[in-house]
Amino acid sequence: MSDRHLVVGAGPVGRHVAALLAARGSHVTVVTRSGRDTGLDGVAHVALDATDADALTRQAEGADVLYNCANPGDYTQWDRAWPPLAAAERSGAVYAITGNLYPYGPVDAPMTESLPDAATDHKGVLRARMWADARDALTAGRLSGTVEVRSSDYVGPGVGANGHVSRVLPAALQGRRVTMIGRTDMPHTFTDVGDVARTLVAAAEDPGAHGRTWHVPSNAPRTQAEALADVLAAAGRPPVRIGSLRGPGLAVAGLFSPLLRELRELRYQWDRPYVMDSTAARERLGITPTPWDEVCLRTAQG
């Protein structure tokens, strides 16, 4: 192996993947539309539109792994064939995908990787198709390897608006009342973004882990209210009052916010227990989640 890695996207996961690889001395290139510098030592940055399969393929030449950590806010951009898959096929790189739990749709029990991808909403169906396309390419011999790691809602440093807890944290740190999506008293799995990166890299580099999905090792579930209170406590702040945006209120809010309009399709995640089982990845990859107290402190520090 040449120990060369191409990371598509510099959001919370992409940045953590790049940092993890660079820290061990790997050759890492991060691709974003703007080419902005992540500030990570030893990481190269390239301005490139990841929807340009030809340009992305040229950049991927010689890479051992192509990490798809991109997450466009507008899922309609993903309705066509996703170019990172084509780039991985043409370059021979292992294709490692940052996934989530959307493909399963509503569930009534803890989620394991053996569940079918049975979602019927737009986001869930699209995510399921992206993984199915990659798996089919591997089966047909067009990919040297592929794997997808799935996580629940992000916590940890650098998450910002990408996380339900960190989204309301700035106001909560000021002692102000905040509003969260759905019920705030249902057990819910939260996943540290650093653990997503560790799992993605480990799975990509383990040929025996390829061809399937893995759940990122995560801590025991907490309710939204508990998770926010834990993060505030880590910052030395008291709990705050929490409002719940549900039903008709969420529908009305969606008229003015594209984000809330999209989240309305996924409201089932907050109206019932939403718990992920990560036993398989812990056993195969030897990864345990970052201790919850540390996760809360890192989240509070941003």
Image (cartoon, grey):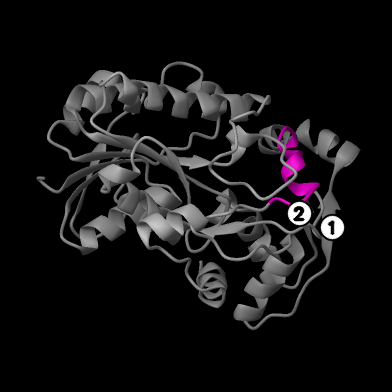
Above/below status of 98 relative to 226: above
Residue at horizontal 43 percent and vertical 47 percent from the top: 11
Above/below status of 116 relative to 11: above
- Residue underneath mark 2: 180
Above/below status of 302 relative to 250: below
Q: Secondary structure at mark 2?
A: strand
CA distance for labels 2 and 1: 6 Å
Q: Quadrant of the N terminus?
A: top left
Q: Earlier in the sequence, mark 2 or mark 1?
A: 2
Q: Residues within 10 Å of mark 2 (few under 14, many from 20)?
A: some
The reply, left or right, for residue 17 in relation to residue 244 is left
Residue at horizontal 58 percent and vertical 54 percent from the top: 277
Q: Residues within 10 Å of mark 1 (few under 14, many from 20)?
A: some
- Residue underneath mark 1: 243
The reply, left or right, for residue 18 in relation to residue 72 is left
Give coordinates of residue 251: x percent, y percent: 83, 34
Residue at the limit of the structure toward the left, as seen here: 2
Give coordinates of residue 159: x percent, y percent: 52, 56
Residue at the limit of the structure toward the bottom, as seen here: 236
Give coordinates of residue 293: x percent, y percent: 56, 77
Part of the protein shown in magenta: 264-274
Residue at horizontal 26 percent and vertical 28 percent from the top: 88
Tell whether label 1 touches label 2 (CB within 8 Å): yes
Kind of residue indicated by mark 1:
Gly
Residue at horizontal 72 percent and vertical 37 percent from the top: 106
Q: Secondary structure at mark 1?
A: strand
